[in-house]
């Protein structure tokens, strides 16, 4: 194992799955979705909107945390899928014409997904979502927007049903610019995941949230996060 991976892995071994769950819960994106669900209380609509938004979350004009907070505020007021063009025009204007065109394709693919599979089926095996979206959108299974949609579905499913979906191990980490500074390839992240016994998609929050800054953690977990930040680039 390369020395860089070995050093990080040794620090990550201190984190339990309970720790990761707590860090995920402290993610501003998770908090925004939790508040959103408290307002609408419709699991299917909630998850459908989440997946569509995740598939359009690229080249943002603001931080990702702020974007998802704006998403939650906008859609909690009795708005639905057909209101996405208005939302994009307000909060996701960069390359807007291309995103509006992509929205039409994304909408069709996501609506097909929810017709093809029940929430229970998607909750039993999240790979179904990845396989369907990658095929329908003609993207690779490890494409950032596809696996990011899986991650945000995971967040939403946990909020709506108080449990994690199954089938997480075969879903890659959403490899964005922040994570590439740690390890640049999906292969390296999967090596870390195997060493830790933690699915790659769950490693995302463990690395990404502390990089972005996190507060309100128990003292013992804060100390673990402090040590982790020391070995991150």
Image (cartoon, rainbow, N blue to C red):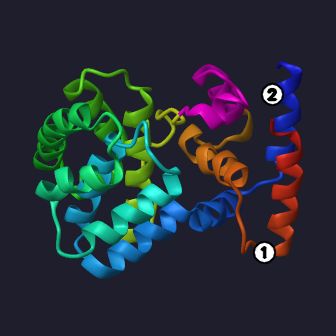
Magenta span = 175-194
- Kind of element beneath mark 2: helix
* Magenta-colored segment: predominant secondary structure: helix
The x and y percentages for residue 57 are 38, 43
How many marks the image carries: the answer is 2
Residue at label 2? Answer: 5
x then y, percent, for residue 143:
42, 26
Quarter of the figure that contains the N terminus: top right
Q: Residues within 10 Å of mark 1 (few under 14, many from 20)?
A: few
The quadrant of the picture occupied by the C terminus is: top right
- On screen, residue 100 versus residue 30, left or right, reads left
Q: Residue at x 89, y 22 (%)?
A: 3
Marks 1 and 2, Cα distance to the nearest angstrom? 27 Å
- Tell me if residue 210 can be seen: yes
Across and down, in percent, residue 214 comes to 70, 63
194 sits to left or right of 228: left
Answer above or below: position of 211 versus 37: above
Q: Nearer the viewer, residue 49 or 134?
A: 49
* Residue furthest out toward the bottom: 39
Instruction: Specify few, some or many for label 2: CA neighbours under 10 Å numbering under 14, 14-19, or 20 or more.
Output: some
Q: Looking at the picture, does residue 88 appear above or below residue 213? A: above
Residue 120 among those drawn in magenta: no
SS at circle 1: loop
Residue that carries the numbered disc 1 in the rendered image: 218
Can you give x and y, in whole percent of width and height, for residue 22 in the image? 65, 66
Give the residue at x 53% y 51%. 63
* Residue at left offset 54%, top offset 35%: 173
Which residue lies at the image location 39% right of the left edge and 35% below the top edge?
145
Cβ–Cβ under 8 Å for marks 1 and 2: no
First in residue order: circle 1 vs circle 2: 2
């Amino acid at each position: 194992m390369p020395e860089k991976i070995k050093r990080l892995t040794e620090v990550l071994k201190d984190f339990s799955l309970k720790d990761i769950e707590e860090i995920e819960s402290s993610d501003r994106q998770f908090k925004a979705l939790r508040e959103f669900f408290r307002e609408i209380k419709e699991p299917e609509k909630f998850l459908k909107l989440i997946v569509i938004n995740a598939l359009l979350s690229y080249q943002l004009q603001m931080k990702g945390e702020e974007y998802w907070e704006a998403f939650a505020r906008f859609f909690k007021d009795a708005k639905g899928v057909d209101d996405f063009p208005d939302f994009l025009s307000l909060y996701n204007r960069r390359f807007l014409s291309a995103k509006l065109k992509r929205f039409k394709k994304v909408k069709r693919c996501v609506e097909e997904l929810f017709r093809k599979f029940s929430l229970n089926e998607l909750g039993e095996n999240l790979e179904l979502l990845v396989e369907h979206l990658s095929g329908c959108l003609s993207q690779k299974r490890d494409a950032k927007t596809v696996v990011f949609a899986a991650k945000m579905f995971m967040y939403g499913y946990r909020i709506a049903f108080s449990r994690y979906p199954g089938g997480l191990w075969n879903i890659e980490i959403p490899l964005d610019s922040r994570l590439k500074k740690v390890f640049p390839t999906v292969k390296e992240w999967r090596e870390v995941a195997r060493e830790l016994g933690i699915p790659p998609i769950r490693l995302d929050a463990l690395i990404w949230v502390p990089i972005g800054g996190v507060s309100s953690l128990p003292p013992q977990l804060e100390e673990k996060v402090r040590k982790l930040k020391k070995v991150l680039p």
